[in-house]
Image: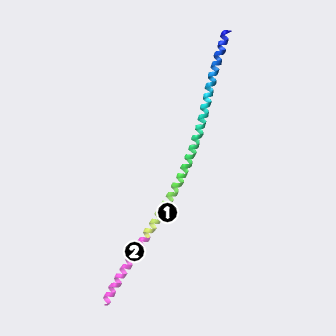
Amino acid sequence: NVEHLQWIQHNEVHEHRMNEALHRLRETLDELTVQKKGIKMQVEMDGDAKDKWTQNKSEVERRKKMLENTVEALRQALRQAEDQNTRMQDDNRAGADNFRQLD
């Protein structure tokens, strides 16, 4: 009878320890679930940030290409203006020479 009571008491102590361990595991599970949700949110935010960065990069590259095209157009216009200026100076010199020869 005493052995049976000791066995029951031993089982109750073991049950109590197992319940405490189970409770700690549930708390750990809850903490990990919260951490998982936080990490998932961070990953989503990082994904959004990456998408935004990619979109911004594309926009910057598009603007850069437009500026490069504008620079090239301005260079061509400058070359044409310089050529026209050279022709005008040549015409002025020729006109001045002709005028001097008339004297």
Inspect the magenta stretch and tell me whether residue 81 lies in it. Answer: yes
Give the answer, above or below, for where 44 lies relative to 97.
Answer: above
Amino acid type at circle 2 is Asp
Amino acid type at circle 1 is Met
Q: Quadrant of the N terminus?
A: top right
Question: Under tag 1, what secondary structure?
Answer: helix
Rounded to the nearest whole Å, what is the CA distance between mark 2 and mark 1? 26 Å
Q: Which of marks 2 and 1 is nearer the N terminus?
A: 1
Instruction: Find disc 2 in the rendering and name its residue.
Output: 83
Instruction: Find disc 1 in the rendering and name its residue.
Output: 66
Please name the residue shown 51% across and 59% down the image: 62
At which x and y percent is residue 68? 46, 63
Inspect the magenta stretch and tell me whether residue 58 lies in it. Answer: no
Question: Under tag 2, what secondary structure?
Answer: helix
Q: Is residue 99 left or right of residue 31?
A: left
Q: Is residue 42 left or right of residue 69?
A: right
Please name the residue shown 42% across and 74% down the image: 81
Please name the residue shown 39% across and 73% down the image: 82
Residue 40: quarter of image: top right
Magenta segment range?
A: 77-103
Q: Nearer the viewer, residue 83 or 27?
A: 27
At which x and y percent is residue 75? 43, 68
